[in-house]
Image: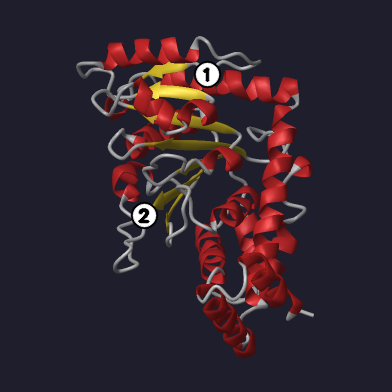
Amino acid sequence: MDVGTLVADARRGRPRAVARLITLVENAAAVPGGDERLREAMAAFATATGPGASGGGRGPYGARVIGLTGSPGVGKSTSTGMLIRAFRKRGRRVGVLAVDPSSPFTGGALLGDRVRMQEHATDPDVFIRSMASRGHLGGLAWATPQALRVLDAAGCDVILVETVGVGQAEVDVARLADTTVVLLAPRMGDGIQAAKAGILEVADVFVVNKADHDGAQALVRELRNTVAPLRGPWRPPIVSTVASRGEGADDLLAALDKHTAYLDESGELRRRRLARARDEIETIALARLRARFAPEGRERRLDFLAERLLAAETDPYTAADELLATLG
């Protein structure tokens, strides 16, 4: 199917076209310099997203993007499922990008998040796509920003982005989402470990899941004591949930709505979207620049410079200058 037909079908919300376009996005990462079909699709989508596409449950810049992150085992997929149900009750169209880690040995990924969201599989207003991280650090796949554009243009009101179970400093989702939800659970580490992981800086909303387990209230207290000294226009609320039973869904939605209102009133939403656009342009530009090093002659030059650096015959900055000079 040609790209124009795929784009037209995706804008009508047809799942197969949306799926094929996201596959095109993922495969484009392996094409030196990018895939021209993807460029054509993104150009066609330009008027289907952003300020001119708001309305209904969508924000002033199109779909509302909510990121969910946290350590493995805290209940990210179950919480995502709970949020899908909550937004569907409001009549919102929901897209989900669930990123799973790729094996460093085989390169494969389980893509198992959809197993926990089976109840939504037949809902035509819910689109769930699992994506492999393909070795990309930061908890997201390289293709996630472009996949967001596809779901936005397909008419999703809310897009939930569930990251890989992140470790310390793997918090790219905060640069992609309008609202970042950080999930914690009892017995998954203390407040000091949470601070080390960098989540205090990226969280817009804290969720203590599995609140029916021992230690949940102690974790809430620790978080309150840690968050209390923070100064700023927005202080992240702490919500307790039992996602497996749907408990706390209303409280979580209320916290998300409050943050959305803050983003709109303060102008922070525009600032975040502008930063996201800058990152997206820079990522594509750097990928195309790397592709220009692909010709065999430049590869040999890079090997030659690496040998010289290893032999202490040059320094890395001079070597980089020499390599850039070959671009002409």
Number of residues whose C-alpha sits closer than 10 Å to that of mark 1, classed few (under 14), some (14–19) or many (20 or more):
many
Element class at badge 1: loop
- Residue visible at 61% across and 59% down in the picture: 10
Asked where in the image residue 282 lies, by quadrant, the reply is bottom right
- Residue visible at 29% across and 12% down in the picture: 218
Q: Which residue is mark 2?
A: 101
- Residue visible at 27% across and 37% down in the picture: 73
Residue 99 to residue 86: above or below: below
Asked where in the image residue 274 lies, by quadrant, the reply is top right
Q: Which residue is mark 1?
A: 236
Q: Position of residue 259 (x, y in %)?
A: 60, 22
The three-letter code of the residue at mark 1 reads Pro
Along the horizontal axis of the image, is 255 left or right of 82?
right
| Mark with earlier residue (2, 1) | 2
Residue 268 to residue 122: above or below: above
Along the horizontal axis of the image, is 51 left or right of 323?
right
In terms of depth relative to the viewer, which is nearer, 128 or 216? 216
Quarter occupied by the C terminus: bottom right
- Residue visible at 68% across and 25% down in the picture: 263
Quarter occupied by the N terminus: bottom right
Element class at badge 2: loop
Q: Position of residue 114 (x, y in %)?
A: 34, 49
Q: Position of residue 168 (x, y in %)?
A: 41, 39
Tell me whether the residue at label 2 lies in contact with that at label 1, contact meaning CB atoms closer than 8 angstroms.
no
Number of residues whose C-alpha sits closer than 10 Å to that of mark 2, classed few (under 14), some (14–19) or many (20 or more):
many
Q: Which mark is residue 211?
A: none
Residue 105 to residue 253: above or below: below
Q: Is residue 108 visible?
A: yes
Q: Position of residue 198 (x, y in %)?
A: 47, 32
Separation (CA) of disc 2 from disc 1: 28 Å
The three-letter code of the residue at mark 2 reads Pro
